[in-house]
Each structure stands twice: as C-alpha cells, then as structure tokens.
Image (cartoon, coloured by chain):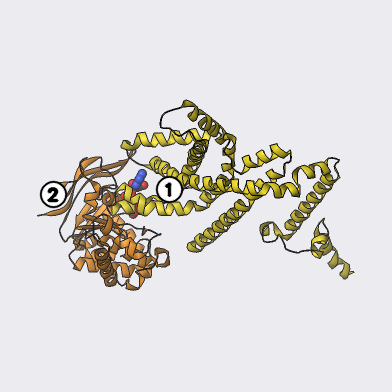
Chain colours: A yellow, B orange
Amino acid sequence: MTDTDNREPAEAIELPAGSRFVASGSPGLFNGMLSQSGSRGALMAFASTILFLVVAAVIILNSDAWPKVRNQFLNWEHFKASFPDVLAAFWLDMQMFVVAEVFILTFALLIAVLRVLRGPAFFPLRMLSTVYIDLFRGVPLLLVIFLLGFGVPALDLPGVPKSPMFWGIVSLVLSYSAYTAEVYRSGLESVHESQRAAARALGLTQWQALRFAILPQAIRNVVPALLNGLVSLQKDVALISVLGVREAVREAEIYKARTFNYTSLLVAAILFLIVSVPVARFADWYTARDRRARTKGLQ
Amino acid sequence: MNHRVRLEGVHKRFGDKHVLKGIDLAVAEHDVVCLIGSSGSGKSTILRCINLLETVDEGAIYLDGEMITRRETDPNLVRQFVGIVFQSYNLFPHMNVLDNVTLSPRRVHGKSKDEAEQRATELLERFGLSDKILEFPDRLSGGQQQRVAVVRALATEPELLLLDEITAALDPELVGEVLGVIRDLISDGMTLLLATHEMGFARDVATRVCFLDDGAILEEGPPAQIFSDPQMPRTQQFLRRVTEAGRL
Ligand SMILES: Nc1ncnc2c1ncn2[C@@H]1O[C@H](COP(=O)(O)OP(=O)(O)OP(=O)(O)O)[C@@H](O)[C@H]1O
Ligand SMILES: [Mg+2]
C-alpha cells in the first residue's frame, strides 16, 4: 500500500508526452538552454520540435509535387555547376560588407557624438544628426538602395560616380549608420554623468573627456549590439543585387534564369549561413562573457 | 590678506529651489577650511561652483583675486589650478591607476609621458600605493580608490584642493588611511576647502570651520569656538545630533 502511494505521484510527473522518449534518448540535451523552465519544459520543447519536424517532413515528402520540387531546388548536378560562380560572386559580397561596416562604425560614431554634444553652439549639429537618424531609420533600406542606386547616376552629375555598387554601399552606410548611431548613443548615455564631471574637473575639454573617459566605456558597453548589427549587415549586402551588381544572389539568379533550376539560390543561402552563423555564435558568446564579467564586478 | 579663493554673495538656484542664499567665504593660502552642516545644506554645491562645474546665479567668485564667474573665463584654465575629489571615487574604470593619475598631467598640462609617470609614481609611493600602480580601480578597496583619487587631483599640482566628503562612502576602518593622506597634504601647506562629516577630524585640522544651514553660512570661526561654544541654536542642535550619532 505504502509502496504504490509512493510510486504514483512520481509516475504522474514523468508521464506527460515526451518524458519516456527522452529518458531513453538523450537526457538533458536542451537542459542548459532552458534551465530556467526546468528539465520538464526542455523535454516538452524537444519533443514538440521533433514532432513538428517529422510532421512537416511527412507532409512535404508525400506531396505530389515533391519530386519535382526536389529536382528544382536540390539538384546535386546544378549545385556543383553553379557553385564556382556563386562562390566567386559571394567574395564580392564579403568585400562590400567589410567596406560598408568600416564606414558605418566610423560614421555612426560621429553622428552619435554630435547628438550628445552640449552647449547652444552645437544646436545645429545636434539637430542635423537627429534629422538624419529619423530620416534613415524611417525609410526602408531597399527604397534607399533604389533611390540612390538608380536616381543619382540618372542625374548624370559631373564628377559624381555612376557605379551602382558605389551607390549600393553608400545606401547601406547611410541606412545602417542611423541605427548604429543610436546604438552608440545608448552606450554614451549608459556612462554615468559623474565620469564626465570627474574628467571635466581634471581640466579636460569636452572633447578630451569624451575621447579619454566616456567613449572607451560607452563602446565597451555596446559591443554586443554592434556585433548584432554586423550579422544583419552581412546578409543585407545582398540587397545590392537589385541594382544589377553581380554578387552572389544576382549570380544565382542569372544561373537560375539560364537553367530554370533554383538550386543556385540554395548555394547562395548556404554561403551566407556559413559566414553568419559563426559571427552570431561569437556575438552570443561575447555577450555572455561580458555579462559574467560585469556581474562578477558587482559582487 | 591674500585670498586663494573668495566667494561674495553667491546665490545658486536649481529651478525654483534656492540652494545657496548669499554665501560669503574666503580661503587664504595654507588655510584649511571645513564646511559642515546637514545633508542638503549646500556644501557640495559650493565646491562645485568654485570648480565651475555649476554656474552661479548671483554674486562672484574670485580665484587669486581674479573674478572667475564671468563668461570669458575658460573653466578648463580654472580647473588647472583647482583640484576636486568627490565622495564617490569616480576613477576611470577602464584605465589602470597610473593612467588615471597621468591623464590630466599629460593631456591638459602638456607633460611628457615619462615626466608624468615619474611624478605619478612618486606620489603613489608616498601615499602607500606603489604596489597598485598597474591595478585597475575595481580591484582596489574603497580606501585605496579614494587615495588614488586624491593623488590624481594632486598630480595636476593644484593651488587649491576641494574635497567633498571624501570619506563618506568608506567603511569606518578605511577612513583613517584617507584622513592620513589629507593630514600629509596639510603639513605640506596645501590650501584646502573640504566638506566633511568627520567632526573630530575637522576639529583637529581645520584653521576655520563654517557651519552651513539651508544654503547660508550661519556661523564660522576657529574649530575650538564652533565645536565647544557654538552661538547659534541651529549649530548647537546640529552638533548635538552629530554627537549623538557618535561622530564627535
Ligand atoms: N543638479 C541639481 N539639480 C537639482 N537640485 C540639486 C542639484 N544638485 C543639488 N541639488 C539640491 O541642492 C541642495 C544642496 O545640495 P548639496 O549636494 O550641495 O548638499 P550637501 O550639503 O552637499 O549635502 P550632502 O551632505 O548630502 O552631500 C539639495 O537640496 C539638493 O537636492
Ligand atoms: Mg554633498
């Protein structure tokens, strides 16, 4: 009697959906990720993910169109055939990405600094940077690319570059700098006012206080946010393809138009993933490490 | 007499809050003037006004006889002669001790790196911090941080040092080491204006004590007089409360 009394509640806890499945399989696989919600929540998450994938696979693989789709999107011959061109074009994506990022990080910093300047003399600059940020955060990036990429060259101004790639990068820089400036600004505002007072009290000018006391701390505070922006820029570079620049997506489309097979697009997608996933993991790792370092400092 | 710093009828308002109500105060060379008074009476505000971290609304402040509360004054020049240390240490957390101390000598006073570091090292050694030179502030105790903050202010060779309750945030057993540093400065002949809650210390070292109440100096004089024979009822009341709290 006492025996069953003891066992029943225990069974009642272990009974729900995925528990048996995980007990025989890989216990605790997701425990680390979901530790707050407890191992039972992790089991549920794991089980439902598997269930979803299985159901989705069954539905897709049994659909009448699947053999045709597989041939259209996952054709190994086309994969091999399109790979070299797409890869070469992807190299251009990476170059544009690096150039854009360097300009974004510098230009955005300038905008952010203008925005936090004090004193009536700087009012026009403060206002200019505010207007800029509002403008470029408000307009979709794709629109900026269309407007600058097609609009400016069409003006046919002497001495102004006509290269679509140039204007594509300019669009990325203008648009991303508006967001990134706000990231920097949040960093600047996270540095306590007393740090500025301490620097000014030592006789440092407003600029020196910024450069030596405030900015180093501000930037350190926003590195995780900057890394996230980096991940997102890395794929948004592909938007420049709308201007006809032969980067990876464009190259894949050209292949697709020639062969009526979509596998080349998958090649491009995989290439972007190969770069972005490690950067994203690094961003997470850095953020976690940084948070640990800070909480340790507080104790 | 030649005054290092002199305040004449200084008024300060924050919005419609009247914080300083006509402060007259003079500090001569080698003076050690202590500002005492309850929290919110305006001690910090006086120090911040002298350092031009706040602008005064009325009245004037003179530094070595020259009026500094004018539009034309360059606050950075004033701050090259007036050092200030705050209650919370305000060291720069991203710089080690040596960089904290040499920042102003190098960037403001145009000293070479070597010269600045040599002088900084001497000062740090003198105040018992020689083994902390390359340490970052968050690895120092409160007392050590505050001593570094004093050294950082001294490294600019100020003619006048303002200290704003620099022991108030410290554990009691660390107060002594910081007060020791101030005693050393006084024996060097440094001119000091300090806000403090350490009445025993004020009585020991001050050449003059000013009791501040609600934005006005209610009573001032030599420490013996203020602490042993205060005239104003408010001063007596304040000192009684301080004595009860065990700080005298
Ligand atoms: N920046 C500010 N804005 C508005 N009010 C302020 C500001 N700085 C100080 N005050 C007010 O001015 C008054 C005097 O402040 P102050 O810091 O000078 O007092 P204190 O004598 O130094 O007090 P404590 O002993 O607590 O340090 C307080 O009432 C405070 O709230
Ligand atoms: Mg104060």
Question: Does dot 1 land on a helix, a strand or a loop?
Answer: helix
Picture coordinates of residue B132, whole percent (x, y): 36, 70
Against A182, residue A30 (above or below) is below
Q: Residue at x 58, y 54 (%)?
A: A279
The answer to which of B153 and B135 lies nearer the viewer is B135
Picture coordinates of residue A187, whole percent (x, y): 46, 49
Residue lying furthest top? A155
A225 sits to left or right of B47: right
Q: Amino acid at mark 1?
A: Leu
Mark 1 chain: A
Q: Residue at x 32, y 39 (%)?
A: A119
Picture coordinates of residue B66, whole percent (x, y): 14, 47
Against A166, residue B203 (above or below) is below
| Rendered image: mark on residue B65 | 2
Question: Does dot 2 land on a helix, a strand or a loop?
Answer: loop
Mark 2 chain: B
Q: Number of labelled discs?
A: 2
B16 sits to left or right of A21: left
The answer to which of B223 and A55 lies nearer the viewer is A55
Q: Nearer the viewer, mark 2 or mark 1?
A: 1
Mark 1 sits on what residue?
A188
- Say whether marks 2 and 1 touch (CB < 8 Å): no
Instruction: Note whether residue B41 is visible.
Output: no
Can you say which quadrant of the picture contains the N terminus of chain B? bottom left
Mark 2 surroundings within 10 Å by alpha-carbon count, few (fewer than 14), some (14 through 19), many (20 or more):
few
Picture coordinates of residue B31, whole percent (x, y): 17, 60
Q: Residue B114: which quarter of the image?
A: bottom left
The answer to which of A177 and B139 lies nearer the viewer is A177
Q: Are marks 2 and 1 on the same chain?
A: no
Residue lying furthest left? B1
